[in-house]
Image: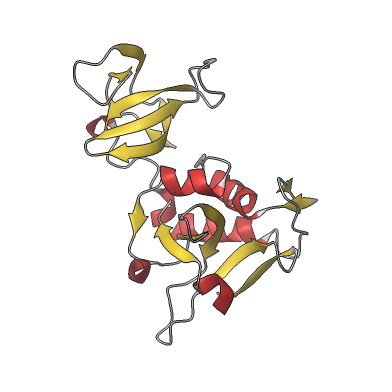
């Protein structure tokens, strides 16, 4: 989630003259779902709505967000805390839809790890990819996320980088692996590399 820095109306369309939907104030948090130029499509978790179970949906200008909005993971302490939380799940069985130590899936692992540093991400991998700003795969460092997709571009898997890519191209990561049916920390397998499509910073 990101923090609002000024009173801002959430509007029905990405335009200055669009109809007002609700208003957020400094300190309130929003989840960025999509970015379109200088506009962001968001949901406001603190404003419950029948329009979206996650919170009130609508558009707002990107400039309304705080400059330091939820960049916790960019600090050494944030990275350490994120990875420490993820590693508490090592060896936990892969369970589709799971988010606990009894069983967890790939996006559930990322969801819980981010939660540990105060960041609330969307629940599913494809929504996590859409909510975050992509970074170049060569810029990945510890704590960043890798996203994997089908040939049609539909994101199906997410992993957490545990270190920058090595000179030989090895990409260390931790993920809930649906093939091994466990949470594992390992170099990115060759079959995953072929489906790797993007990376993002929490």
Give the vertical position of 163 relative to 109 (above or below). Answer: below
In this orientation, does residue 101 appear? no
In this orientation, does residue 143 appear? yes
Picture quadrant of residue 17: top left
Residue 106: x and y in percent read 63, 55
Q: Quadrant of the N terminus?
A: top left
Residue 136: x and y in percent read 33, 64
Residue 123: x and y in percent read 58, 41
Residue at 52 percent of width and 68 percent of height:
162
Q: In screen coordinates, is 78 left or right of 59?
A: right
Q: Outermost residue, bottom direction?
A: 168
- The number of discs equals 0
Colour scheme of this structure image? Answer: secondary structure
Q: Outermost residue, right direction?
A: 102
Who is closer to the viewer here, 105 or 76?
A: 105
Picture quadrant of residue 41: top left
Q: In screen coordinates, is 86 left or right of 9?
A: right
Q: Outermost residue, left direction?
A: 16
Give the vertical position of 118 relative to 17 (above or below). Answer: below
Residue at 54 percent of width and 27 percent of height:
54
Residue 200: x and y in percent read 41, 56
Picture quadrant of residue 7: top left
Give the vertical position of 135 relative to 47 (above or below). Answer: below
Residue at 54 percent of width and 15 percent of height:
50
Q: In screen coordinates, is 106 left or right of 20?
A: right
């Amino acid at each position: 989630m990101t923090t609002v820095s000024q009173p801002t109306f959430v509007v029905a369309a990405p335009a200055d003259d669009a109809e007002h939907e609700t208003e957020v104030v400094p300190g309130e948090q929003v989840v960025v779902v999509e970015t379109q130029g200088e506009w962001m499509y968001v949901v406001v978790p603190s404003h419950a709505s029948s329009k979206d179970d996650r919170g009130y949906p609508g558009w707002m200008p990107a400039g309304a967000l705080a400059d330091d909005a939820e960049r916790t993971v960019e600090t050494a302490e944030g990275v350490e805390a994120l990875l420490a939380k993820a590693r508490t799940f090592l060896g936990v069985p892969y369970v589709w839809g799971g988010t606990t130590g009894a069983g967890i899936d790939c996006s559930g692992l990322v969801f819980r790890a981010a939660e540990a540093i105060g960041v609330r991400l969307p629940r599913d991998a494809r929504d996590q990819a859409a909510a975050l700003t992509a970074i170049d795969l060569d810029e990945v460092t510890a704590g960043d996320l890798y996203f994997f997709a089908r040939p049609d571009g539909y994101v199906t898997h997410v992993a957490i980088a545990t270190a920058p890519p090595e000179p030989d191209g090895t990409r260390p990561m931790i993920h809930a692996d649906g093939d091994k049916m466990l949470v594992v920390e390992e170099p990115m397998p060759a079959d995953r590399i072929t489906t790797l499509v993007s990376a993002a910073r929490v």
